[in-house]
Image (cartoon, helix red, strand yellow):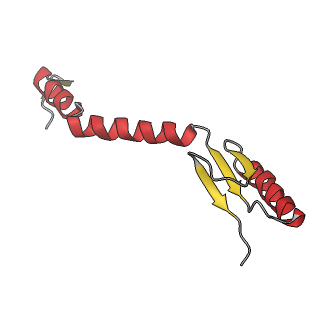
């Protein structure tokens, strides 16, 4: 509802439009939560590829190949091959069936 006075918008309608544009607590929370999520996605993650301590050389080579391929697909992440469970972070388990 804009009222016109000689082709201009009145002060009252500008104040009402400004009040509608204000951000409430829920909008601030959503904004901050989305910013935190984006920061978490942008952060570099360490991913460990777990293999058995008794893994054969061909299994170790396959794990190294997987790590290098994943590093090319996801350049922000760091992939490492290990035979022990990491204390924190993400991991992929390779095993024989």
Q: Residue at x 16, y 22 (%)?
A: 6
Rendered view: 80 above or below 22? below
Query: Residue 79 versus residue 29: which sits nearer the camera?
Result: 79
Q: Is residue 93 left or right of residue 20?
A: right
Q: Quadrant of residue 44 in the image?
A: top right
Residue extending furthest toward the right: 57
Rendered view: 25 above or below 82? above
Query: Residue 35 versus residue 9: which sits nearer the camera?
Result: 35
In percent of width and height, residue 59 lies at: 83, 65
Q: Residue at x 29, y 38 (%)?
A: 29
Quadrant holding the C terminus: bottom right
In percent of width and height, residue 58 lies at: 88, 66
In percent of width and height, residue 32 lies at: 36, 35
In percent of width and height, residue 96 lies at: 74, 74
Q: How many marks?
A: 0
Rendered view: 94 above or below 17? below
Q: Quadrant of residue 31 in the image?
A: top left
Quadrant holding the N terminus: top left
Residue extending furthest toward the front: 54
Q: Residue at x 24, y 32 (%)?
A: 23
Rendered view: 5 above or below 43? above
Q: Residue at x 77, y 53 (%)?
A: 67
């Amino acid at each position: 509802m804009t009222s016109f006075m000689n082709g201009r918008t009145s002060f009252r309608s500008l104040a009402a439009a400004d009040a509608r544009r204000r951000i409430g607590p829920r909008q601030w929370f959503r904004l901050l939560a989305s910013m935190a999520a984006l920061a978490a996605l942008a952060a570099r993650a360490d991913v460990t590829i777990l293999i058995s301590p008794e893994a054969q050389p061909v299994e170790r080579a396959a794990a190294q190949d997987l790590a290098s391929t994943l590093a090319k697909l996801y350049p922000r992440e760091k992939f490492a091959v290990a035979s022990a469970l990491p204390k924190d972070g993400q991991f992929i388990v390779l095993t024989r069936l």
